[in-house]
Amino acid sequence: MTGPDAAHRAVEAAARQSRARLVAFLAARFRDLAAAEDAVADAFRIALDLWPRQGVPHAPEAWLATVARRRITHALRHGAVRRAAEPALTLLAGEAEDAAMAARPLPDDRLALLFVCAHPAIAPEMRAPLMLQAVLGLDAARIGSAFLVAPATMGQRLVRAKARIRSAGIGFQLPEPQDLPERLSHVLDAVYAAFGTGWEMVAGGDTRGADLTGEALWLGRLLVELMPSAAEARGLLALMAHCEARRPARRDAAGRYVPIDLQDTTLWRADLIAEAEAQLAAAAALGRPGRYQLEAAIQSAHNARADPAGRPQPGPDIRLALYSALMAIAPSAGAAVGHAAALAGTAGPMHGLHALDAVAGLETYQPAWALRAHLLAASGDAASARAAYARAIGLAEDPAVRSWLAAAAAGLNDGA
């Protein structure tokens, strides 16, 4: 491959395909995530300078790894006092190490890097941002924007989190088998937190959220690629894909909120639904059910009406069984509201209201008040429904949702 344009395309392709592998490889070797990120960034800058003039190397990833490794060892030599504990052999690997990297593919340490970012010693709110930067290469400004944090503040938090990794001596390797399930749950929760943040931003009409949900889907696919026998990783990917499939229909052409039961299913993305169903089936075949698989199954039930093959629509009793199972293993405010709605669908609105009354901690949870208003209206209590709608409107952050709730309240019939 020759020519400046071809060289620049080669650098861009290497960045997409190899950046995370390079960062993970160097971070695992030198136990310093920040240094690995800086060295890889330097290697790509050097490639942008040299490849257009000298040609693209035969093995671009190995070339980049060699340059990045040399940048780190150079920095370590000049920081000998600060890093006196670094093993001498790491500093003196030299040409033998370069030759070894060129002769075989780099080991894939991305999974270990994901576990480092989600280590229990890292503050929970920083796990997802760390993954987005370390594995996806997003800068602090973009991450801060996604999480509604000032870029400078997010940058400082990321620096502190990486320093915490170094000072705590967190190992860049997979956990021991007995520790793997708990640690994997931290990874999955962090990926889902990133997706949920993006999802809420999309719900609020913020287009930046679509980028974040896309990045979370990428991380989910990476986890499945690296851990194909992890049923909950497949369940999480299925859950995110099912939800993301409906994004084009969540607003009408005028930007108005459209509840799921009224959405135009022709706008739902069939490719993502098919991906979700395949992942959910593969997870079920592993025989290890869990929270994310149940949540994905609930979303699958919602999305069944868009199935071009005419997949049978799960009845209310199926949804109730799924929510009951979810409440048994992973109770939450969202699961409780879903369970109450499913119960109302099978036994009537009063049963749903009683289920809501039995759950503590829903006083400021907006979906609970929206459901309460809907069930009160369905039961014929318009006055109480209006009061519940007012509470739901006051708690809603999305203007489009507030407008929809206000229209529903205005349409109540006192004589119903």
Image: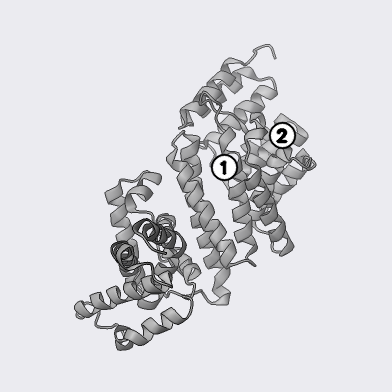
Q: Is residue 327 visible?
A: no
Q: Quadrant of residue 63?
A: bottom left
Residue in the image at 69% along x and 24% along y: 378
Residue in the image at 57% along x and 75% along y: 178
Residue nearest the observer in this picture, 338 or 358: 338
Residue 312 as seen in the image, left or right of residue 293: right
Residue 390 as seen in the image, left or right of residue 339: left
Q: Quadrant of the C terminus?
A: top right
Mark 1 or mark 2: which comes first in sequence? 2
Residue in the image at 65% along x and 67% along y: 229
Q: Residues within 10 Å of mark 1 (few under 14, many from 20)?
A: few
Specify the farthest residue to the top: 415
Note whether 256 is above or below 119 in the view shown.
Answer: above
Q: Quadrant of residue 182?
A: bottom right
> Where in the figure is residue 136, as x and y percent of width and height?
43, 58
> Where in the figure is residue 133, as x and y percent of width and height?
39, 58
Residue nearest the observer in this picture, 160 or 345: 160
In this rendering, the count of numbered labels is: 2
Q: CA distance from mark 1 to mark 2?
A: 19 Å
Q: Which mark is residue 360?
A: 1
Residue 325 as seen in the image, left or right of residue 202: right
Residue 187 as seen in the image, left or right of residue 237: left
Q: Is residue 282 visible?
A: yes
Q: Which mark is residue 344?
A: 2
User: Disc 1 marks which amino acid?
Assistant: Ala
Q: Quadrant of the N terminus?
A: bottom left
Q: Secondary structure at mark 2?
A: helix
User: Disc 2 marks which amino acid?
Assistant: Ala
